Amino acid sequence: MEKLSQLIQDVLKLCSTYWPVYLSGMKNTIILALIGTAFGCLIGFVCGILNTLPEDPNDSIWRRGLVKAIKVLVRVYVELFRGTPMVLQAVFIYYALPYFTDGAARFTSVWAASILVVSINTGAYMTESVRGGIISVDPGQAEGALAIGLSHVQAMLYVILPQAIRSILPQIGNNFIINLKDTSVMFMISFTDFFAAHRGVVGATYSYFPSAVIEMAGYLTMTLLSSFLLRKAEKKLEGSSSYELVAADSLTLTSGTYTYPKKEGVFDERSREFPGKE
């Protein structure tokens, strides 16, 4: 108990003295994770659509070759950035430019480099999630869209993706939570995120474990809050538990307004005109 009491005192002392440093690091972490996830989702959606381009045997050899080359490039991108740690990607991207140009060209903003690293890393994972969401939609939807004259991209944007987004959303949230934690590796390129704030406080006080406790509590708070908000968004997409169906033809037996009181069974519908037994 004495050690626990001492730990609490040390944590409170650090919080009272260095709370602006910790809050600034948390703010930078959240902003980087949000922007990186947003751009990564955009990259993932574009690459996911390109990865599902149809290969029609009736097309010219040049078109088929172009489609094949695009798919190969997307596959190389996905495998490269999914198969290497983000910390090494940050080091290579940030230091490769001045290395190959003898210092003539370099990133002038560590924010730009960090956003680029997180975005392309997230995009690699989102590409496969988007592809999985697309192929989970009934193929008849795509065939119907193409039959009425829509192009492949139009069919994806207006027919397939609106249906696939429901199954993709949990993975988007999962990538955001992962990015909240994985941005800690950006200290390798001097980005001042939450983990860099912890390292700065430790360097000034040599109180590693009390600062690590604050760090763990901060990351846990951010991830739990994000999970709560994402579950709220998923429930919002599910819609209301009650709805009304109105038949347009007044001569049909099913005409009238129906209310679904609660989700107790698949066929649990109740008619206002024919209430039956309560």
Image: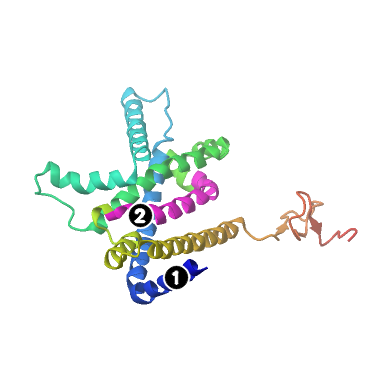
What residue is disc 1 on?
6
Within-10-Å neighbours for mark 2: few <14, some 14–19, many 20+: many
Confirm whether the magenta stretch covers residue 39.
Answer: no
In what quadrant of the picture does the C terminus appear? bottom right
Q: Which sits in the foreground, 223 or 165?
A: 223
For numbered disc 2, what is the local secondary structure? helix
**Name of the residue lying farthest toward the front:** 2
Marks 1 and 2, how far apart at CA:
31 Å
Q: Determine the residue positioned at 69% across, 60% down.
A: 241
Q: Are marks 1 and 2 in contact (CB under 8 Å)?
A: no
Residue 237, by quadrant, is bottom right
Q: Nearer the viewer, mark 1 or mark 2?
A: 1
Magenta span: 159-187
SS majority, magenta: helix
Q: Is residue 21 above or below residue 107?
A: below
Amino acid type, residue under disc 1 in the picture: Gln
Q: Is residue 277 above or below residue 132?
A: below
Q: Which sits in the foreground, 252 or 76?
A: 76
For residue 244, side relative to residue 176 (left or right): right
For residue 268, side relative to residue 77 (left or right): right
Evaluate whether residue 115 shows in this view: no
Confirm whether the magenta stretch covers residue 172.
Answer: yes
Please give the label number shown on residue 20: none
Q: Determine the residue positioned at 29% across, 51% down.
A: 116
What residue is disc 2 on?
183
Amino acid type, residue under disc 2 in the picture: Thr
For numbered disc 1, what is the local secondary structure? helix
Q: Which sits in the foreground, 108 or 1?
A: 1
